Amino acid sequence: MAQTPSIVVTVSGTDRPGVGALLWNALGELGHPITDIEQITVRGQLLLCAEIDAPAESDLDALLERLAETDLAREPGISVTAVRYSDPVAESLGPRQMVTVVAPEMTAQALEGIFSTIASLGGTVERIMHLSSYPVTSYELTVAVADAGALRARLIRAARRLGVDLAVQRAGLYRRAKHLIVMDADSTLLQGEVIDALAAKCGCEDAVAAITERAMAGELDFEASLRERVGLLAGLPATVLDEVAAETKLTPGAQTLVRTLQRLGYVAAIVSGGFTQVIDPIARGLGIDLVAANTLEVVDGVLTGKVIGAVVDRAGKADSLRRFAEQVGVPVNQTVAIGDGANDLDMLGAAGLGIAFNAKPVVRDAADAAISVPYLDAVLFFLGISRKEIEAADLEN
């Protein structure tokens, strides 16, 4: 479809109350319909753009002369310009993509690498939003590009080279619709592996840790490795489960992540290959009702070394995500899964957005996005939630 002729009027200078009102008054006097508005203020410096419908034969010089006669043009420190907008390339571009870039410290070299990659595909950055400066720096870029798949592939390679975390998603209101966020427990929501902590209580931590490492690297079948590890726990008193639950620490940023999600209307869930006896009390403390995990068999107050029922393994995690999505009425493409190990791969693949959190290489390579900083609340930035919104949600509750 041919693009409607338009003119972009730009107001720049020192911001102060009333500048916007003067622009709308001036454009109202000119009589052209307004079709788009963009504004940004950085450290008191204003850039305000308004696109107006204008027939192709409109006299741009005459428009500028009329603008020069308005109160807006007489404002000290304010500059008003107008240019005819014509971008036939934009008509060939696909749906806008949202590129989120996260790093402990954002360097000019990293940004140059990201922007150069976008430009190499003929893409343009239409908008930049600063999401956070703490605990990490993050920016959200709205990108117009013809080939979204190529953009994602090249940016992921560039991000690894540049040492930043990155996600590419289709832009749109669905990102702010109701979401289900499903988290793995061990080494994601929680620090370390719960089964390793249990093994330490019975002095078999080295044997269990070796099996765990091989399983998380995808070298062993998860169910077989889980049963083998659990077998080593036979004879432990069940009271040890309560001790481990009390001793287990949340990953930095986990409380902020869950609290913010809940206050903004999102639903958080835990899907884990760990154990309900440890995870359930932690979930209750966080206000999370949706939990899927394995249950250790206890007889006469002692662990038998067996698991009750079907094991929540790699496939079981993906099934649990789908079940929870149906339960809360969220389409699967509006789910987010976060994990670190090979047994999370199916869950990450099933979700609308799969995020590898400080993950093994095999998981990082397969996920839609990756986080390498040690803060779980960095996930919020991939959802387009800014640090200001996080702090505002805290103040409102």
Image (cartoon, helix red, strand yellow):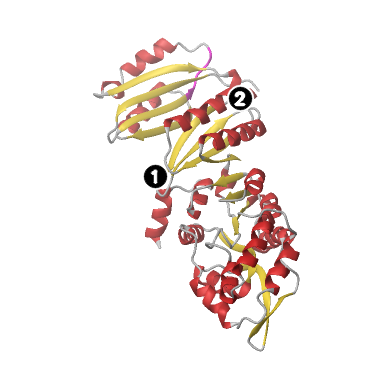
Residue 161's label in the rendered image is none
Q: Position of residue 386 (x, y in %)?
A: 44, 47
Q: Residue at x 26, y 24 (%)?
A: 75
Residue 97 visible? The answer is: yes
> Farthest bottom residue?
300
Element on which disc 1 rests:
loop
| Along the viewing direction, whichever of 163 and 228 lies nearer the viewer | 228
Residue 249, compared with residue 349, is above or below; it is below
Q: Which residue is mark 1?
A: 133
The answer to whether residue 55 is magenta is yes
The prevailing secondary structure element of the residues shown in magenta is: loop
Mark nearer the N terminus (1 vs 2): 2
The answer to whether residue 134 is magenta is no
Q: Position of residue 356 (x, y in %)?
A: 60, 50
| Along the viewing direction, whichever of 96 and 132 lies nearer the viewer | 132
Q: Residue at x 66, y 89 (%)?
A: 300
Residue 331 visible? The answer is: no
Q: Residue at x 63, y 87 (%)?
A: 301
Query: Is residue 358 found left or right of 324 in the rendered image?
Result: left
Q: Which residue is mark 2?
A: 121
Residue 266, compared with residue 76, is above or below; it is below
Look at label 2 and name its amino acid.
Answer: Leu
Element on which disc 2 rests:
loop
Query: Is residue 70 found left or right of 333 in the rendered image?
Result: left
Q: CA distance from mark 1 to mark 2?
A: 29 Å
Q: Residue at x 70, y 52 (%)?
A: 350
Q: Quadrant of residue 68?
A: top left
Q: Over which residues does the magenta segment extend? A: 52-56
